[in-house]
Image (cartoon, rainbow, N blue to C red):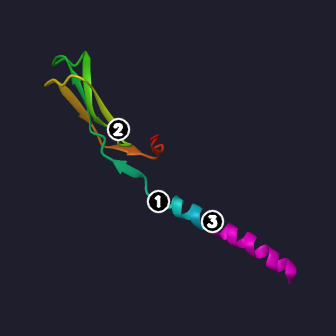
Amino acid sequence: MKRLLGLRPVIAAAVLIAAVLGFFAVLPETEAFAGICTYYSNASHTTVVGQRGSDCCGVPVNWGVVTQFRTCEGPVYCIWCPPPTE
């Protein structure tokens, strides 16, 4: 009987771990709109001069200049985003 009492915490921990893993296994993939627009110097789209928007993890993308010649992409599917560094 004492041996059975010693196994209770081990069994409880195993059940808890299985429940947590099961919870994360059924979570859907994160779908986020990644509004990345790439700007070009002319209508032939040969030279990139800037980008605006955010990536699928929400990190801002903002460099260069904005022109009337652009292409935009999205949505992008994220499976995992790293934790913030701040």
- Image x and y of residue 22, in percent: 56, 64
- Disc 3 on helix, strand or loop? helix
At a point 86% along the width and 81% down the height, the residue shown is: 2
Q: Which residue is mark 3?
A: 18
Q: Which residue is mark 2?
A: 55
Q: Alpha-carbon neighbours of circle 1 within 10 Å: few (<14), some, or many (≥20)?
A: few
Q: Which residues are magenta?
A: 1-16
Q: Alpha-carbon neighbours of circle 2 within 10 Å: few (<14), some, or many (≥20)?
A: some
Apparent side of residue 64 relative to residue 7 in the rendered image (left or right): left
Disc nearer the start of the sequence (2/3): 3
Q: Residue at the right extreme?
A: 2
Q: Are marks 2 and 3 in contact (CB under 8 Å)?
A: no
61 versus 84 height, above or below = above
Marker count (numbered): 3
- Marks 3 and 1, Cα distance to the nearest angstrom? 15 Å
- Image x and y of residue 70, in percent: 19, 27
Q: Name which quarter of the figure residue 6 lies in.
A: bottom right
Is residue 8 one of those drawn in magenta?
Answer: yes
Q: Name which quarter of the figure residue 74 lies in.
A: top left
Disc nearer the start of the sequence (2/1): 1
- Disc 1 on helix, strand or loop? loop
- Image x and y of residue 67, in percent: 16, 23
Q: Residue at the left extreme?
A: 68
Q: Which residue is mark 1?
A: 27
At a point 27% along the width and 27% down the height, the residue shown is: 51
56 versus 69 height, above or below = below
Q: Amino acid at mark 3?
A: Ala
Image quarter hosting the C terminus:
top left
At a point 75% along the width and 69% down the height, the residue shown is: 10
Q: Main secondary structure of the magenta part?
A: helix
12 or 68: nearer the viewer = 12
Q: Amino acid at mark 1?
A: Leu
